[in-house]
Image (tube, grey):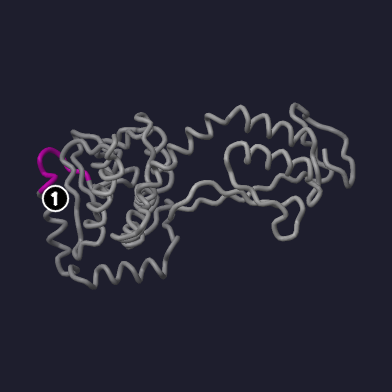
C-alpha cells in the first residue's frame, strides 16, 4: 500500500486516455468488472455486457477504500444518481440485465456475442472520430453542465469534465487523485480526537450565545485548537469572537467555515424535546 498514490496516478492516467480519446469508445464487458475495472468501463462512451455471466461492481465500500475525487466525478457524471449512490454505498453486484436497467450499460447480449455487438456499435460511429469529437464534447459540457434526463443522468458529452476531475493536469503540484488518501488520514485524526470534540460540542450547546456575543464559545474552541497544534489568530475582521486557525503547510489547502452562535428563541440543550420560547435570548 506504500505506493498507493503512484498506483492511483497510473489508474487515473488510463482513465484520462480513454476519456480524451478522439473517437467513440465501447467497452465489451465479457465477464466480471470490479473496482477499477468497473470504473474503466464507465470511462467508455458505451458499454455492452454479457447477460448470462459476470457482474459490474464497486466493492470499495466493503474493503474500506475511499473513492478519489476523479472516481467520484466519473460515477456522478456517468450514472443516474440513484444508481451511483447504491453502487458506491452498498457494493451491489449488477448482472448484465440489471446493469442495463440501472443505466450502467446500454446493451446486454447473450452468450459470446459481447465483442461482436461492441464492434458493430463502434463501426456505426466511425464517422464521428477525430479532434472534433473532443471539442464537441467540451462545448456540450459548457452549454449543458448539470442538465440531466428524467432519470437524473447527466448527458454523455461530459467526458472532458470527468477527465478534468481525474487529473487537473499532468504536472499539477497536487493531484486530485490523492485526496482519497488525505480523507482517510483526516478520518483517523478526527476519530482520535472524538472525545474532545464531542465534549466541546456539548459544552457550547450547554452555554448558548447569540451572534457576535459568543465569547465563551470562541474561547473554548480556540483552546482546543491551540492544544491540537493549530496556529490561531483571533479578532479576525475586527470581530472579537471571530478567528482563523491554520495547521500544516503545502500546496493542498482545505478550508472549513464554521458557525457556533445560537439563535434566539430556539432550544439547544441536549435531551430537550421542547421548551418555552424566550424572545431575544438563546436556549
Pointer 1 residue: 117
In the rendered view, tell whether residue 216 sits above or below residue 252. Answer: above
**Residue 113 magenta:** yes
In this view of the protein, which residue sits in the foreground, 29 or 67? 67
The quarter of the image holding the C terminus is top right
The quarter of the image holding the N terminus is top left
Label 1 sits on a secondary structure element that is: helix
- Residue 57 is left or right of residue 66, and the answer is left
Q: Residue at x 89, y 41 (%)?
A: 278
Q: Residue at x 57, y 40 (%)?
A: 229
Coordinates of residue 77 in the picture (x, y in percent): 37, 54
Q: Residue at x 35, y 33 (%)?
A: 91
In this view of the protein, which residue sits in the foreground, 172 or 75? 172
Quadrant of residue 270 within the rendered picture: top right
In this view of the protein, which residue sits in the foreground, 22 or 197? 197
In this view of the protein, which residue sits in the foreground, 61 or 33? 61
Coordinates of residue 152 in the picture (x, y in percent): 44, 52
- For label 1, the crowd category at 10 Å Cα-Cα, with few meaning under 14, some 14 to 19 and many 20 or more, is some
Quadrant of residue 164 within the rendered picture: bottom left
Coordinates of residue 245 in the picture (x, y in percent): 61, 48
In the rendered view, tell whether residue 188 sits above or below residue 172. Answer: above
Q: Residue at x 17, y 37 (%)?
A: 31
In the rendered view, tell whether residue 3 sits above or below residue 255. Answer: above
Range shown magenta? 108-115
**Residue 2 magenta:** no
Coordinates of residue 107 in the picture (x, y in percent): 23, 48
Amino acid at each position: 500500500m506504500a505506493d498507493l498514490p503512484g498506483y492511483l496516478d497510473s489508474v487515473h492516467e488510463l482513465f484520462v486516455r480513454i476519456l480524451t480519446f478522439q473517437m467513440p469508445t465501447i467497452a465489451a464487458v465479457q465477464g466480471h468488472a470490479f473496482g477499477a475495472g468497473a470504473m474503466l468501463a464507465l470511462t467508455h462512451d458505451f458499454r455492452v455486457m454479457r447477460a448470462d455471466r459476470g457482474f459490474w461492481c464497486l466493492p470499495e465500500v466493503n474493503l474500506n477504500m475511499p473513492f478519489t475525487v476523479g472516481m467520484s466525478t466519473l460515477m456522478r457524471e456517468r450514472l443516474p444518481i440513484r444508481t451511483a449512490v447504491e453502487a458506491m454505498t452498498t457494493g451491489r453486484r449488477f448482472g448484465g440485465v440489471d446493469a442495463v436497467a440501472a443505466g450502467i450499460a446500454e446493451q446486454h447480449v447473450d452468450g459470446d456475442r459481447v465483442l461482436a455487438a461492441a464492434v458493430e456499435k463502434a463501426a456505426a460511429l466511425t464517422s464521428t472520430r477525430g479532434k472534433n469529437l473532443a471539442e464537441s464534447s467540451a462545448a456540450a459540457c459548457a452549454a449543458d453542465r448539470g442538465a440531466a434526463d428524467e432519470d437524473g443522468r447527466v448527458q454523455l458529452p461530459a467526458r472532458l469534465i470527468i477527465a478534468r476531475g481525474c487529473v487537473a493536469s499532468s504536472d499539477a503540484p497536487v493531484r486530485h487523485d490523492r485526496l482519497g488518501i488525505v480523507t482517510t488520514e483526516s478520518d483517523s485524526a478526527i476519530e482520535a480526537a472524538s472525545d474532545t470534540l464531542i465534549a466541546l460540542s456539548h459544552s457550547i450547546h450547554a452555554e448558548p450565545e447569540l451572534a457576535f456575543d459568543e465569547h465563551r464559545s470562541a474561547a473554548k474552541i480556540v483552546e482546543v485548537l491551540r492544544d491540537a497544534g493549530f496556529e490561531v489568530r483571533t479578532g479576525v475582521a475586527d470581530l472579537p469572537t471571530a478567528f482563523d486557525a491554520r495547521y500544516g503547510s503545502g500546496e493542498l489547502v482545505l478550508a472549513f467555515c464554521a458557525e457556533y452562535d445560537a439563535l434566539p428563541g430556539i432550544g439547544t440543550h441536549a435531551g430537550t424535546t421542547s421548551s418555552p420560547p424566550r424572545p431575544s435570548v438563546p436556549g
